[in-house]
Image: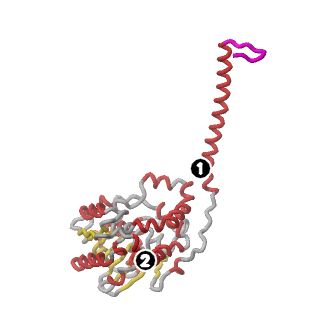
């Protein structure tokens, strides 16, 4: 190596190169360390600096209700429900995740000819009020157990001693837990494409969403999913999406105009705990009917078959050319299955 004015031996050249390399690595490590610190600071504090503005053009749920809507206060929650019929036997309908009483609009009136039919919006959905953190004590009203307790509390308030529970999707999970917790209050159980084996997010995701930074941004995630993907999600629930009329889509979207709908759905997600109900299905002693569409792409038909096998003496009905919501897509076949079952068990 030659530098004007200097002559280096190979040994000296090695020392110089080593010194240059050490200085370079020192500065490089400092740069990497600074970048790591910046990234950590960003992920630690950045989410708390992102504004979450309130949604515009939302209304109190009561102002969005239908002419036949009714409300009753249960544990400081204004529960929205609809009721039809005046028979001795009562059917209580529980909708699925992201749905509302609207999901039952094609079957309430036909069923009310022979039964008293009550459909209600579970906490976090439809036009039931949405309490925010700090407005309750103890267990979250959005938890699965709280919603099972709410089902019985609604029955108590409306003076229903015993009822047949009909639960769709996640509503089937709530109906199953209610039956296991309060068997003396349930006459029979009808599970419609019930989310027993697929009742919530996986464990690793539950842990992730409870990280404070993710927890804060949750309402933004909910808004993006439900506003941008709601039509696609609805189409996935139907065997024939062409039956999804503009009127039906508006019925689904209407609850997304309720105040705090995004925060409530996020609280519902945060409150989820795995129940492992599949391990307790054999303890159900009331008559059970399991209904599934043969083209359910959300809760596969095989899951409903497994449920029917695990519950003693459960009946299984598979409705052809139907998806995740047979009570909406194929209501005639759904009503036929329900009525035949109820005629035998009531």
User: Picture quarter containing residue 201?
Assistant: bottom left
- Residue 123 spot, x, y in % from top left: 46, 71
- Residue 317 spot, x, y in % from top left: 25, 70
Q: Residues within 10 Å of mark 1 (few under 14, many from 20)?
A: few
Say left or right for 141 vs 118: right
Q: Relative to residue 258, is residue 14 depicted above or below?
A: above
Is residue 7 in the magenta section?
yes
Decide if residue 44 is in sight here.
yes
Decide if residue 137 is in sight here.
no
From the image, tell me which residue sits under label 1: 43
For marks 2 and 1, the one nearer the N-term is: 1
Q: Relative to residue 38, is residue 282 depicted above or below?
A: below
Dot 2: what SS?
A: helix
Quarter of the picture holding the N terminus: top right
User: Picture quarter containing residue 190?
Assistant: bottom left
Count every numbered label the image shows and give the total: 2
- Residue 68 spot, x, y in % from top left: 45, 85
Which residues make up the magenta segment?
1-9
Say left or right for 201 vs 91: right
Q: What residue do we see at 44% from left, 51% from top?
A: 204
**Which of the two residues, 286 or 120, is positioned nearer the viewer here?**
120
Residue farthest along the right direction in this orientation: 5
Q: What residue do we see at 52% from left, 77% from top?
A: 61
Is residue 114 in the magenta section?
no
**Which of the two residues, 65 or 229, is positioned nearer the viewer here?**
229
Quarter of the picture holding the C terminus: bottom left
Q: Relative to residue 19, is residue 161 depicted above or below?
A: below
Pair 2/1: label in front: 2
Give the numbered dot on residue 102.
2
Could you tell me if the residues under marks 2 and 1 are in contact, i.e. CB atoms within 8 Å? no
Dot 1: what SS?
A: helix
Q: What residue do we see at 48% from left, 76% from top?
A: 250
């Amino acid at each position: 190596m030659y530098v004007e004015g200097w002559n280096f031996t190979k040994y000296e050249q090695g020392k110089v190169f080593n010194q240059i390399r050490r200085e370079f690595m020192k500065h490089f490590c400092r740069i990497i360390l600074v970048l790591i610190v910046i990234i950590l600071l960003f992920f630690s504090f950045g989410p708390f600096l992102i504004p979450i503005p309130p949604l515009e053009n939302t209304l109190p749920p009561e102002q969005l209700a239908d002419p036949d809507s009714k409300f009753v206060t249960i544990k400081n929650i204004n529960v929205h429900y609809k009721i039809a019929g005046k028979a001795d036997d009562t059917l209580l309908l529980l909708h699925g995740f992201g749905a509302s009483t609207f999901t039952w609009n094609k079957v309430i009136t036909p069923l009310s000819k022979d039964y008293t039919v009550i459909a209600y919006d579970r906490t976090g959905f439809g036009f039931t009020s949405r309490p925010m953190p700090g407005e309750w004590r103890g267990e979250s009203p959005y938890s699965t157990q709280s919603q099972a307790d709410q089902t019985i509390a609604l029955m108590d308030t409306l003076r229903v001693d015993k009822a047949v529970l009909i639960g769709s999707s996640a509503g089937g999970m709530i109906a199953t837990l209610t039956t296991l917790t309060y068997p003396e209050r349930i006459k029979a159980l009808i599970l419609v494409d019930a989310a027993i084996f697929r009742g919530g997010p996986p464990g690793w995701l539950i842990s992730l969403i409870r990280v404070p930074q993710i927890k804060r941004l949750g309402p933004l995630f909910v808004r993006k999913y439900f506003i941008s993907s709601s039509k696609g999600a609805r189409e996935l629930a139907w065997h024939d999406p062409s039956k999804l009329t503009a009127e039906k889509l508006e019925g689904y979207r209407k609850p997304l105009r309720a105040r705090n709908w995004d925060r409530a759905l996020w609280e519902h997600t945060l409150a989820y705990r795995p129940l492992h109900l599949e391990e307790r299905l054999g303890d159900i002693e009331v008559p059970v009917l399991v209904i599934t569409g043969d083209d359910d792409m959300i809760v596969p038909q095989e899951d409903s078959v497994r449920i029917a096998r695990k519950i003693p003496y459960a009946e299984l009905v598979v409705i052809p050319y139907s998806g995740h919501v047979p009570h909406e897509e194929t209501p005639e076949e759904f009503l036929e299955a329900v009525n035949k079952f109820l005629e035998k068990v009531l």
